Protein backbone atom coordinates (compact mmCIF):
# COMPACT_ATOMS: atom_id res chain seq x y z
CA UNK A 1 0.00 0.00 0.00
CA UNK A 2 1.06 3.56 -0.67
CA UNK A 3 -0.11 6.43 1.51
CA UNK A 4 0.22 9.97 0.20
CA UNK A 5 -0.24 12.77 2.71
CA UNK A 6 -0.57 16.41 1.76
CA UNK A 7 0.28 18.69 4.66
CA UNK A 8 -0.49 22.36 4.95
CA UNK A 9 2.05 24.15 7.15
CA UNK A 10 0.81 27.71 7.71
CA UNK A 11 3.65 30.24 7.66
CA UNK A 12 6.12 27.31 7.86
CA UNK A 13 5.19 26.68 11.50
CA UNK A 14 5.24 22.90 12.04
CA UNK A 15 3.05 23.06 15.14
CA UNK A 16 0.22 24.47 12.98
CA UNK A 17 0.39 21.78 10.30
CA UNK A 18 -2.66 19.82 9.24
CA UNK A 19 -3.26 17.10 6.67
CA UNK A 20 -6.36 18.03 4.65
CA UNK A 21 -5.84 15.15 2.23
CA UNK A 22 -4.57 11.62 2.79
CA UNK A 23 -4.83 9.14 -0.09
CA UNK A 24 -4.26 5.39 0.24
CA UNK A 25 -3.47 3.30 -2.84
CA UNK A 26 -3.77 -0.49 -2.59
CA UNK A 27 -2.97 -3.28 -5.00
CA UNK A 28 -6.21 -5.22 -5.48
CA UNK A 29 -4.34 -8.49 -6.29
CA UNK A 30 -6.09 -8.98 -9.65
CA UNK A 31 -3.18 -7.97 -11.87
CA UNK A 32 -0.30 -9.99 -13.24
CA UNK A 33 3.47 -9.92 -12.93
CA UNK A 34 3.55 -7.22 -15.60
CA UNK A 35 0.58 -5.02 -14.69
CA UNK A 36 -1.13 -4.08 -11.46
CA UNK A 37 -4.64 -2.94 -10.65
CA UNK A 38 -5.05 -0.52 -7.79
CA UNK A 39 -7.88 0.88 -5.71
CA UNK A 40 -7.45 4.26 -4.10
CA UNK A 41 -9.43 6.28 -1.58
CA UNK A 42 -9.24 9.47 0.39
CA UNK A 43 -9.14 8.99 4.13
CA UNK A 44 -10.61 12.51 4.56
CA UNK A 45 -13.47 12.29 2.03
CA UNK A 46 -15.40 9.02 1.66
CA UNK A 47 -16.84 10.15 -1.69
CA UNK A 48 -13.38 10.38 -3.25
CA UNK A 49 -12.19 6.98 -4.47
CA UNK A 50 -11.38 5.15 -7.68
CA UNK A 51 -9.11 2.69 -9.41
CA UNK A 52 -6.13 2.53 -11.72
CA UNK A 53 -6.26 -0.50 -13.99
CA UNK A 54 -3.48 -2.01 -16.08
CA UNK A 55 -0.64 -0.01 -14.53
CA UNK A 56 2.73 -1.21 -15.84
CA UNK A 57 4.69 -2.35 -12.77
CA UNK A 58 7.98 -1.27 -14.37
CA UNK A 59 6.87 2.35 -13.95
CA UNK A 60 7.86 4.30 -10.86
CA UNK A 61 5.59 4.57 -7.81
CA UNK A 62 5.48 8.32 -8.36
CA UNK A 63 3.82 7.69 -11.73
CA UNK A 64 1.09 5.67 -10.02
CA UNK A 65 0.54 8.55 -7.60
CA UNK A 66 0.39 10.93 -10.59
CA UNK A 67 -2.31 8.75 -12.21
CA UNK A 68 -4.39 8.91 -9.03
CA UNK A 69 -3.98 12.67 -8.66
CA UNK A 70 -4.87 13.07 -12.33
CA UNK A 71 -8.19 11.35 -11.60
CA UNK A 72 -8.73 13.60 -8.58
CA UNK A 73 -7.97 16.69 -10.69
CA UNK A 74 -10.43 15.58 -13.35
CA UNK A 75 -13.16 15.09 -10.73
CA UNK A 76 -12.65 18.60 -9.36
CA UNK A 77 -12.80 20.06 -12.87
CA UNK A 78 -16.05 18.20 -13.60
CA UNK A 79 -17.48 19.31 -10.26
CA UNK A 80 -16.68 22.95 -11.07
CA UNK A 81 -18.42 22.53 -14.40
CA UNK A 82 -21.48 21.06 -12.66
CA UNK A 83 -21.09 17.63 -14.24
CA UNK A 84 -22.03 14.66 -12.06
CA UNK A 85 -19.39 11.93 -12.10
CA UNK A 86 -19.44 8.41 -10.70
CA UNK A 87 -16.01 7.29 -9.47
CA UNK A 88 -14.23 4.86 -11.78
Image: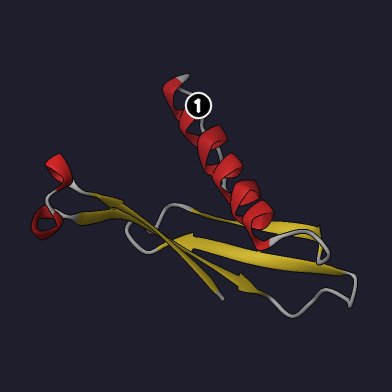
- Residue 17 sits in quarter: bottom left
- Residue 50 sits in quarter: bottom right
Q: 25 or 7, which lies in front?
A: 7
Q: Which percent across, then down, holds residue 76?
A: 46, 33
Q: Which percent across, then down, holds residue 37?
A: 75, 67
| Residue at image location 52% in from the left, 27% down from the top | 78
Instruction: Count neighbours of disc 1 (C-alpha within 10 A) and say few if under 14, some if 14 to 19, many if 20 or more.
Output: few
Q: Is residue 19 left or right of residue 34?
A: left
Looking at the picture, does residue 21 appear above or below residue 31? above
**Residue 67 at least partly seen:** yes
Q: Which percent across, then down, holds residue 56?
A: 84, 61
Q: Is residue 82 left or right of residue 70?
A: left
Total tally of numbered discs in the picture = 1
- Residue 61 sits in quarter: bottom right
Q: Which residue is mark 1?
A: 77
Where disc 1 sits, the SS reads: helix
Looking at the picture, does residue 3 appear above or below residue 83? below
Amino acid sequence: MLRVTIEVIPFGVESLKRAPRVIEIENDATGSERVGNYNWRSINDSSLYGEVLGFDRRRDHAELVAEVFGQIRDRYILKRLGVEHEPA
